[in-house]
Amino acid sequence: MISEHLPVLQVVVPLIAAPICILLRRDDTAWGLATLATWISFIIAGSMFVEVQSAGALSYALGSWPAPWGIQYLVDPLNAFVLLVVSGVSAVVMLFARDSILDELGRERENLFYCAYLLVFAGLLGVTITHDAFNLFVFLEISSLATYVLIAAGRDRRALVASFQYLIIGTIGATFIVLGVGFLYAMTGTLNMADLADRVRAYDTNPAIIVAYAFLVIGATIKLALFPLHLWLPNAYTFAPSMVSAFLAATATKVGFYVLMRFVFTVFGPEFSFDTLSVGLPLAILAIVGIFATSIVAIFQNDVKRMLAYSSVAQIGYMVLGMSLATTTGVAAGLIHLFNHSLIKAALFCSVGCIVYRLGSSHINSFAGAGRRMPWTMAAFCAGGVSLIGLPMTAGFISKWYIILALLERGWWPIAVLLVVSSILAVIYIWRAVEPAYFREPPADAGPVSEAPLVLLTATWILVFANIWFGIETSLNVGGAFAAAESLLSGYAP
Amino acid sequence: MSAEVLIPIAIFAPLVGMVLILLSGDERPNQRDAMMVLTSVVTFAAVAGIVPEVEAGGRPRVELLEIVPGLPIAFEVEPLGMLFGLIASFLWIITSFYGIGYMRGHHEKNQTRFFACFAVAISAALGVAFSANMFTLFVAYEVLTLSTYPLVAHHQDHEAQRGGRIYLGILLTTSICLLLIAIVWTWVAAGTLDFTPGGILAGRVQGPELAILFFLYMYGIGKAALMPIHSWLPAAMVAPTPVSALLHAVAVVKAGVFTVLKVVIYIFGLEHLVDTGVSQWFVYVAGFTVIAASCIALTKDNLKARLAYSTVSQLSYIVLGAAIATPFAILGSAMHIAMHAFGKITLFFCAGAIMVATHKTKISQLNGLGRRMPFTFFAFFLGALCVIGAPPLGGIWSKWHLLMGAYDAGQIIAVGVLLLSTVLNIAYLLPPVVRAFLLPPKAEPDHGDGSEAGHGGGHGEGHNDAPGDHGSDDHRGDDGGRGIREAPALCVVPLTLTAIGCLILFFLAEPLFGLLEGISELGAIRQ
């Protein structure tokens, strides 16, 4: 009985929990509710993932209004995979949140923070699960508006500017998406994605459809921070509270990537995107240029959170590069990296969060001597870094393997060479943070510093362990990604 | 126990050992070190237990898990890997003792971390040795790189930081940028990465593409230290000496040249290489490296630096043999893995013992030390002769086969390189011995004998002189009144053992040849 309502519960549970949080002003109760809601969502996403793998797509008609008139939630291999990633990483990050948020925000605003968090979370899940183009926009706005609040909660006053910056750019992105949806609706008279996909084919290269396409793709690339539309991201990640950086890096841009894929593959179809408009090449070029430009910028950052933020933009390039190949392996590689990069960045931001918790800053100088003073934290950072670089036995290696494989399959070997060269840049920027931790003495005036609290370490190490686990036992991430890629391409070959 | 059980035991025993070492910690050093020795013995016993089956022609195989569909982490022991595994695990036992003596004698910090990383490195080296496909080998290869970084940077000072950067920078760059691409390319082209007798590339990759692929492999395997990507090896000498001894003379560097041999034999296939001639370039590159590194070694006054460049040069012997790619040359290369391992580990042990006993690191400071440390310097002498390739030490066998292989293949340049480098070997390896024994007190004729034996290039007479020297040195040291002040026994006994090992290898090379002839392409060439 309840199992058939899982698609809607996925969104409704956090959405209802959000306003309740405001009422909970006793110690930790808001956090407890938010964590509970997140874990319930995770369990729902997990069970839907299993069901989709065995029984195929789940459809849910909201309010029993049948599609294409009513809003339809559709869980297919692609969004089941993304839902699992988003809710899974969030569930672990929530364990990290309690102490970290208490330290950075204090008691009195805690409940408001968790309310905003749950709205972001519900919004992201809603964007992912809905099969209605306008509903997608609505959820995107819910999550974006709440995200601005989360970022503004940062301790540093510059967080406000960062949040405002993101507000402006994010609103432009959302506007683009709603304009694109509007054009589509004007032309086809429908908002249901499957219905849109059927009707759009009839218009072939109608200019209005192409304009809609351009608005949607650019809007989505703003949300996923593809170079050169990434400018909102570094400040947002740098000044947001540690937990927010970890949460957003693991989820928000991933959902943006999902939106891009959904429009490019499901709504417009790979033939239109890659043969008629041939967006593959420009996307690949932007991805490669972005990987290099932002990796190089990352090398010159002295704030480790900002360095990781730029690195995130570079990693998004890897995902888009995989997608731009429009082969099963390529799309799967993009999705595998979506999965793995969530784990990598969450682990890295959490370990930096531990450093911030104890040392008060994420500047490279405050890492000095951390290897001796906080050995477990730094070990986690190193492990996350190794995964980011993509060495074997870590999730990052699996991503890289499949991206290179996809490139060589299509004979794009110069890009494969560029790709591996770019991972050397990752070695450089990660080592810039690792070296002071182990080779420099802590500043003389520093007081005694102990290891981060056990809760923070546990959350961080769960993520590190996941990085290793999914680098060895890959049936979930690789299998899920290939199932999704096959469902998206369904017979298309470039 | 069957070999299928022993393979995982051999690979995972060091990892269990690592946990035991970490659990014991710095508070219980004796328990920790006992754990390490115990682990090393268990590991060697497991490796040795596999030998009979491999000798009988068996290829025991274990599949652990499938990371990527079609690409399992799998282990399969063939003769070459058997040889490498035996050497690495056997020398680990000796290095364990030596490491205890050295680290305590030198009052090093963070000994627990040191020994734990050491164990991981051995596990990875055995993983390289036993890997059944290129994918598994790559995984183990990278684990080896990462696990040795904390060892190289052990002192955590500015110099260690710099050395560590070069070490990690070169090894990661080459393996990620070149080797990984080569592996994926092979996978796309051949549809398999299994080490297959006769190779997997024939008929699948041709012409210039094959040459590019060969280039990617040869320079991707940075651990083989071909010029110009050799500089990580001298940089790694900032590590404590046990690391230089076991890892940067045996496990890590041999993992590199071992990979080269595996790729040449089982990925490209010897016939395919000889037919297409793509490896000819690397005869020249390796030849150049042999000579150039020897010349640089001549200029180094720091003993460990000199030994490091000597290693660079000796590794290229093996690459040279692989590039010639005739069965005879390959056999010589494979033997050189064993012979150079024993010779070079002895030399490094001695360098470390000298450091522990006298805190001297430069060759120019060694004058007259032979009286004080006769065992050490005599062992150094034997190790040097082994590397030079003089009888009655094991080094002669590998050099002989390399020379024969080069000559048979008509590679006159390679023959010239090998001969010239022998002269250079003598020039850079014997001065420390000469200084220690002959300068400044009084000149004795025993140096002349030793050096002649080296120059002779390996004919019978040096054989009888060497033991004679040993006796007289000891005697003189005792009589000299100043007494013997050697490094701790835990340092001296291991280096004596490896020096004796160099001798034994001369007389007992036959079983090794027998083992290696189990490689189908090398079979029956010596009959």
Image (spheres, coloured by chain):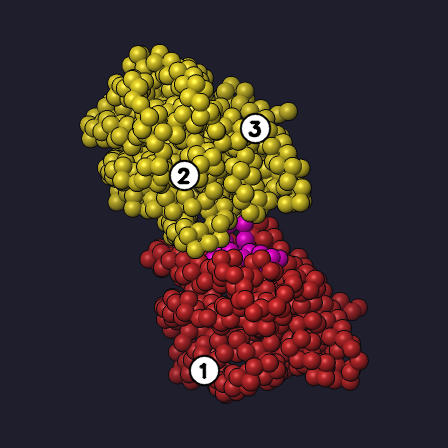
Chain colours: A red, B yellow
Q: Nearer the viewer, residue A489 or B462?
A: B462
Image: magenta residue range: A375-397
Q: Which residue is mark 2?
A: B360
Q: Earlier in the sequence, mark 2 or mark 3?
A: 3
Q: Is residue A402 left or right of residue B364?
A: right
Q: Which residue is mark 3?
A: B44
- Same chain for marks 2 and 1? no
Q: Position of residue A468 (x, y in %)?
A: 58, 53
Quarter the C terminus of chain A occupies: bottom left
Q: Position of residue A188 (x, y in %)?
A: 51, 83
Q: Which type of secondary structure does the marked residue at label 2 adopt?
A: loop
Of circles 2 and 1, the one toward us is 2
Contact between labelled residues 3 and 2, with CB atoms less than 8 Å apart: no
Q: Amino acid at mark 1?
A: Phe
Contact between labelled residues 1 and 2, with CB atoms less than 8 Å apart: no
Q: Which residue is mark 1?
A: A215
Q: Is residue B9 left or right of residue B159?
A: right
**Residue A211 painted magenta:** no
Contact between labelled residues 3 and 1, with CB atoms less than 8 Å apart: no
Of circles 1 and 3, the one toward us is 3
Quadrant assignment, res B245: top left
Quarter the N terminus of chain A occupies: bottom right
Q: Position of residue A67 (x, y in %)?
A: 64, 78
Spatial CA span between label 2 and label 3: 33 Å
Please, is residue A196 above or below residue B333 in the view?
below
Please give the name of the residue rendered at 49% of the width and 60% of the height, measured from the top-left corner.
A440
